[in-house]
Amino acid sequence: MTEDSSNTSAPVPASANANETEKTAIEPIRLPTIEEVRGQDIWNNCAVRSVASGIMGGGLGLAMGLFLGALDNPIQQDTMTGRQLFVYTAKQMGGRSWNSCKAFAVMGLVFSAAECVVEKARAKHDITNTAIAGCVTGGAISAKTGGPKGACFGCAGFAAFSVAIEKFLDRHE
């Protein structure tokens, strides 16, 4: 029993620590495989990146629309039967989810396309690209309903929001 206690408190030889340090410090450089290079080339294409962002934005809008549509309460809730209330809520959820799906898909597509094109044109990856893409997106979405004044406010608002999110996520150095 005394031998076991003396073994646990014995110091580890210095040569064992040195070998472990050398093993972890020296690693060979791993080159990417041809599949990884092709995958990066495909993802660096602005059209692919924009379509993927549009699809993901549509999915997010669909989920948000379903959630927010379920929260709508009809004015005549007291006089409606359970079936009428269920049908009303289902219609509200469907309509709201489809509208949100379209809005978020367009927003994701336009923002991603603008940011990708600006990034490739400037050959830099910084927060200015995000501000420009936010301005383009906000202006394009707001111009339809608000005219030139709405486009200017949409540009400024969406650019400020995009920069704030970018600073919060701290993607750029």
Image (cartoon, rainbow, N blue to C red):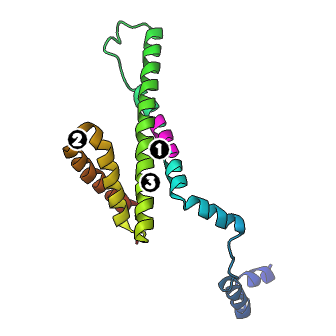
Q: Distance between the residues labelled 3 and 2?
A: 23 Å
Inspect the image, locate mark 1, and give the three-letter code of the amino acid beneath it: Gly
Name the foreground residue: 30 vs 124.
124
Task: Indicate whether 49 appears above or below 102.
Answer: below
Task: Indicate whether 153 appears above or below 59.
Answer: below
Q: Are dots 3 and 2 in contact, CB under 8 Å?
A: no
Q: Mark 2 points at which residue?
A: 147
Q: Residues within 10 Å of mark 2 (few under 14, many from 20)?
A: few
Q: Name the residue under label 1.
A: 57
The nearer-to-camera label among 1 and 2 is 2
SS label for mark 3: helix
Task: Indicate whether 38 appears above or below 25.
Answer: above
Q: Residues within 10 Å of mark 1 (few under 14, many from 20)?
A: many
Inspect the image, locate mark 2, and give the three-letter code of the amino acid beneath it: Gly
Quadrant in which the N terminus is drawn: bottom right
Name the disc covering residue 112, or none.
3
x, y (%) of residue 148? 21, 45
* 133 displayed left or right of 49: left
Residue drawn at the location 22% of the way across and 41% of the way down: 147
Name the foreground residue: 131 vs 79.
131
| Magenta run includes residue 74 | no
x, y (%) of residue 123? 43, 71
x, y (%) of residue 18? 69, 91
Q: How crowded is mark 3: few (under 14 residues within 10 Å), some or many (20 or more)?
A: many
Name the foreground residue: 51 vs 32.
51
